[in-house]
Amino acid sequence: MTTQQTQDQQLRFPEGFAWGAATSAYQIEGAVSEDGRGRSIWDTFARLPGRVVNGENADVAVDHYHRYRDDVRLMARLGLGAYRFSVSWPRVQPDGVGAVNQRGLDFYRRLVDELLGQGIDPWVTLYHWDLPQALEDAGGWPARDTALRFADYAAAVHDALGDRVRNWSTVNEPWCAAFLGYASGEHAPGRREPARAVLAAHHLLLGHGLAMAAMRAQRAGSRIGGCVNLYAVSPLTRSAADLDAARRIDGLQNRLFLDALLRGEYPADVLADLGEAAEGLAETGDMGVISAPMDMLLINYYSRFTVSGAPGGAVSAAAAPTDTGSPWVGSEHVSFAGSGRPVTGMGWEIDHDGLREVLLRVAGDYPRIPLVVSENGAAFDDVADAGGFVRDPERRDYIEAHLRACHAAIGQGAPLVGYFAWSLLDNFEWAWGYGKRFGLVRVDYPTQRRVPKESALWYAETIRRGGLTGPAQ
C-alpha cells in the first residue's frame, strides 16, 4: 500500500480539535478532610446505609490530591492535549458561602500550572455534583438561593484561575443532579421529592446563567458553556403509546435543558407533562439569564434509550444499584426496553450512531454553537495480568466506534471541536462504588498504582495521528 493510500484511509479530525480525557473532583481527589475542605452531600450520602454498593466512599478515592503531578505526567505521556476536571465547591468554600479557602484554591492553581507546564490545556468544570452539605441543609438545589451562591463561587474560582484557564463549563449534567438527586434518590442528597426535583432542575440552569454573567463581568476571553447529558431516544414500536413515551422521555431528558439553554423557553409539552410541579417555575427574567449566549455546548453521551408506553409498563431507572424511586417525573407508565444491542458493564446498550444522531440534532434543530463531546466511555469487567496491564478491546472498540460517529457528524455539518474520553482513571463510580471501572488507566486501589490499559495506548496513538485509520463506516 502506498503512503498516499494509507493517508486516504485515515479519518482525520479538524485542525485544532481538542483531544482529551475527563474526571471529576469527588471521584478522584480523596483528601476529604484536608486543607480546610468542607463536607459535601456525597460525603454524607456515602455514609447512609445501603446507598453505595459495599458501603464504599471517596475519602481516599484514587488520591489525586496528592498524586496530581504524577497523573499530569501520565497525561502527557499519553499525548492528551486537554484535560477536563472539576473543582470541588466545598474545597473552595467549605460551607458554600463567604470567604474562599485559599488552601483549596491553591491546589487547583498548582494543578493548572502543572498542566500548562506539560502543554495540556485545562478545561474546568465548576460543578460536578459535590454540593456543600451546608447548602443542602439550607434547602439544596430546590432553593433558589443556591443558584445565587453558585454564581458567587464560580466568580471566586474564575478570579483565581481565569488568567490561565480559557475553557470553562458551569454545571455538569443538571438532569442527573436534579432528578437522580431529588426525585429517585439514587444520587446525593438522596431525596425522593419529585416536585422539588423540577425546581432543582430550574435552579441548576439558573445557576449556570448567573455564573456565566458573573464570570464575564470579571474578564473577557474565557470560553464558557453548559454541559448536558443527552440520549438518542427511540420508541420500541410505532404504536401511539410508544411514540408518546419516547416524546416524554426525550422531553424530560433532552429538550427540557436544550430548549432552556438555546431557545430561552421550556417545551410546552414537557411543562404539561409535569403539571403542578412546573407551575410558577421561572420568575421574570430567569429564562433570559439561562439562555444568555454560550461559547460552546458540552455534551455527555453514553447510550440510547428505547422506551415503551404499553399498558402495565413500569417506570425504570436504568442500572440503579438499589431499589429507588423514579427520576422520570411526569412520565408514569413508561418502561425502558432492550433492543438487543451489546451492553457495557453498566448494562447500558452500546449505540455509537446515537452519538451522531444527537450531534446532528443539536446542530440542526438549535442555533448554531460549537459542540464538544465532553464525556464518552464505558465500564467493562477488566482483568489485569500479573503486571497490572489490562487488555480491553471492548473499551477500545467502544471509543473507536464513537469517534467514527463524531467524524461522520462533522462530515454532515456538526460543529464539533473536541472529544473527551471518560474517564482518565478508574475511580469512585458514585452509587456503584469501586466495582465499575471506566478508566483508560487502571488504578490498583490498594497500592494506587496506575497502569495504562490497552485502550489508553490505542487512544494515545489516535491522538498522535490526529484521527483514525481505515475507511469510514
Image (tube, grey):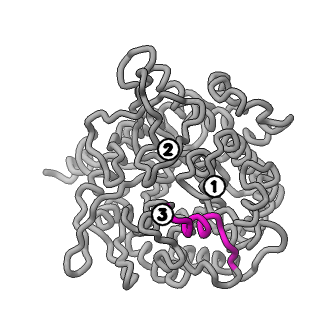
Quick check: 317 above or below 339?
Answer: below
> Do we see residue 215 in this rendering?
no
> Do we see residue 99 in this rendering?
yes
Q: Amino acid at mark 2?
A: Leu
Q: Nearer the viewer, residue 180 or 399?
A: 180
Residue 423, position in %: x, y?
Answer: 43, 62
Instruction: Give the numbered dot on residue 416.
Output: 2
Residue that carries the numbered disc 1 in the rendered image: 169
Q: Nearer the viewer, residue 443 or 114?
A: 443
Residue 112, position in %: x, y?
Answer: 61, 74
Residue that carries the numbered disc 3 in the rendered image: 52
State the residue at coordinates (37%, 85%): 447
State the residue at coordinates (74%, 41%): 290
State the residue at coordinates (83%, 56%): 217
Label 1 and label 3: CA atoms lie apart by 27 Å
Q: Amino acid at mark 3?
A: Val
Residue 260, position in %: x, y?
Answer: 68, 35
Describe the element under mark 2 as helix, strand or loop: strand
- Dot 2 or dot 3: first in sequence order is 3
Q: Residue furthest front?
A: 49
Which one is in front in this view, the residue at disc 2 or the one at disc 3? Answer: 3
Quick check: 278 above or below 431?
Answer: above
